[in-house]
Amino acid sequence: MKLASLFSGGKDSTYATYLAKKRGHEIKCLLSIFTKSDESHLLHHPNIQWTKLQAESMQIPQITIDSRSDDTKNELSILENLLKTAKDDYGIEGLVHGGIKSNFQKDKFEQVCSKYGLTVVAPLWDLEPEQYMNDLLQANFIFIMITVSSDGLDDSWLGKTIGDFEIKTLKKFSDKFGFNLNFEGGEAETFVIDCPLFSNSIKINQSEKKWDGYRGRFEIVDAELNYNA
């Protein structure tokens, strides 16, 4: 099928795009909504502007739009407009997204897609968390944590690249503090630096850490495609 990918630059949307393509689907475009703030219940916010580098590296056209409200109804209306544009311009037949457990997101996306006769593709749905995290590494995904907002996760995780050791540590913390290992509940968010879809990795030149004692963010200030790797 010809698909659009709801794309945030994090591990879930990128890996869902990767799996959809691996299963024979054609990714015609990326759809990215630049949310107003991190209060959105539906979409990803931090560092969303840097998805332009990931799109360039994947050589997939990206359709973007700014959202002036975190209201779910408003964001769904914007997504409808993006889907209509993607259907008109790229002939898409469906939408791929990186949802894993959230029935709220799943239901909303299915409602919007049904209006345009589009199929919803969710390759990550109901994956076991620890296996999923290990699958990311085995597929050569390199990603960093860009937000944390959970007991057990402090500012030392901000900007950290996640590897085998980090997953083992996160598993212990998730068991102890009760957060989702795959961060499905918003306990943390990620940004993909490199993966098999990329022609060039992302090089972060400048960043800032923001920490309030419980929640924190790794803000990418300046980045570029790494042509020397």
Image (tube, rainbow, N blue to C red):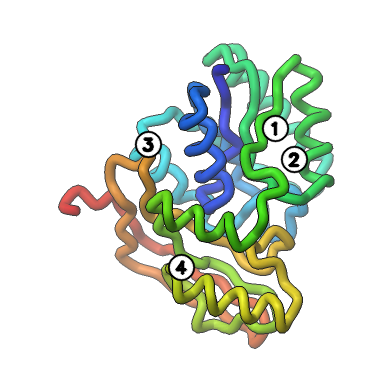
Q: Position of residue 87 (x, y in %)?
A: 61, 15
Residue under circle 3?
58
On screen, residue 59 above or below 203: above
First reached walking from the N terminus: tag 1 or tag 3: 3
Instruction: Tell me what residue is drawn at x 57 percent, y 33 percent.
Output: 5
Q: Secondary structure at mark 3?
A: helix
Residue under circle 1?
79
Instruction: Tell me what residue is drawn at x 40 percent, y 58 percent.
Output: 142
On the picture, is 198 further left or further right than 192?
Answer: left
Q: Are marks 2 and 1 in contact (CB under 8 Å)?
A: yes
First reached walking from the N terminus: tag 3 or tag 4: 3
The amino acid beneath tag 2 is: Glu
Instruction: Tell me what residue is drawn at x 69 percent, y 63 percent.
Output: 186
Residue under circle 4?
162
First reached walking from the N terminus: tag 4 or tag 1: 1
Q: Secondary structure at mark 2?
A: helix
Q: CA distance from mark 4 to mark 2?
A: 30 Å
The amino acid beneath tag 1 is: Leu
Q: CA distance from mark 3 to mark 2?
A: 25 Å
On screen, residue 96 above or below 182: above
Neighbour class for label 3 at 10 Å: few (<14), some, many (≥20)? some
Q: Is any part of residue 211 visible from this angle?
A: yes
Q: CA distance from mark 3 to mark 4?
A: 21 Å
| Mark linked to residue 75 | 2
